Image: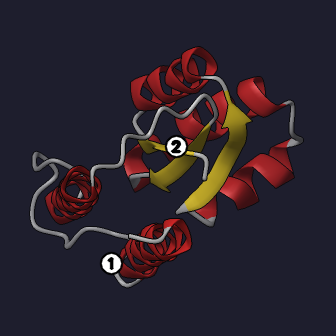
Amino acid sequence: MDFWLVVSLLGGLVTALIVLSNFIPSSPPRRSLLQNPLKPDTRWQLDRMERKLDLILEHLGIQLDATEFDVILAEVPPTHKISVIKTVRELTSLRLKDAKELVESAPVLLQTRSPLEKATTIKRHLEEAGAIVTITPHL
């Protein structure tokens, strides 16, 4: 299969993932304060898209030996917004206003072309703060 066709398929899947995540409501329905504030549908949809992408790549016989990765801030639950903003400020050295706008505009590309160790460190810090983060190979 042609390399550029595969690249366009991957780009289409990433675009579909971002568009899909924009249609998910930003606040969970008000039922109970004891319920999980994270939207389980969002995590499930992200996992499903990643599995589909892995299956397509495996079927085509393509192995991604990426050395550069992108960190995507997928979702920030309202209950953890302040701690995520503080963590984003520490990781990116942004001003408070800029960090707040960045967090509120999730899903957003937070870091691009970073090594795997740095990307996983960023993901770990943000998940400890309460955000949902994905790491994708930079194409």
Place of residue 80 in the rendered image (x, y in percent of width and height, measured from the top left): 44, 41
User: Of marks 1 and 2, which one's residue comes earlier in the chain?
Assistant: 1
Q: Is residue 43 left or right of residue 74?
A: left
Place of residue 109 in the rendered image (x, y in percent of width and height, measured from the top left): 64, 54
Q: Secondary structure at mark 1?
A: loop
Q: CA distance from mark 1 to mark 2?
A: 24 Å
Place of residue 115 in the rendered image (x, y in percent of width and height, measured from the top left): 64, 23
126 or 19: nearer the viewer: 19
Q: Secondary structure at mark 2?
A: strand
Reading the image, the residue beneath label 1 is 24
70 or 128: nearer the viewer: 70
Q: Looking at the image, do the residues carrying marks 1 and 2 touch, with CB atoms under 8 Å apart?
A: no
Instruction: Answer with the quarter of the image where residue 17 lies.
Output: bottom left
Q: Is residue 77 left or right of residue 37?
A: right
Mark 1: amino acid: Ile
Mark 2: amino acid: Pro
Residue at left offset 40%, top offset 35%: 130
Q: Residues within 10 Å of mark 1 (few under 14, many from 20)?
A: few
Does residue 105 lie above or below 62 as drawn?
A: below
Does residue 120 lie above or below 134 as drawn?
A: above
Q: Which mark is residue 137?
A: 2
Residue at left offset 16%, top offset 51%: 33
Question: Count of labels shown?
Answer: 2
Does residue 93 lie above or below 44 as drawn?
A: above
Q: How is the image coloured?
A: secondary structure
Residue at left offset 36%, top offset 79%: 20
51 or 29: nearer the viewer: 51
Place of residue 71 in the rendered image (x, y in percent of width and height, measured from the top left): 57, 42
Residue at left offset 10%, top offset 58%: 32
Quarter of the image where the N terminus is located: bottom left
Q: Residues within 10 Å of mark 2 (few under 14, many from 20)?
A: some
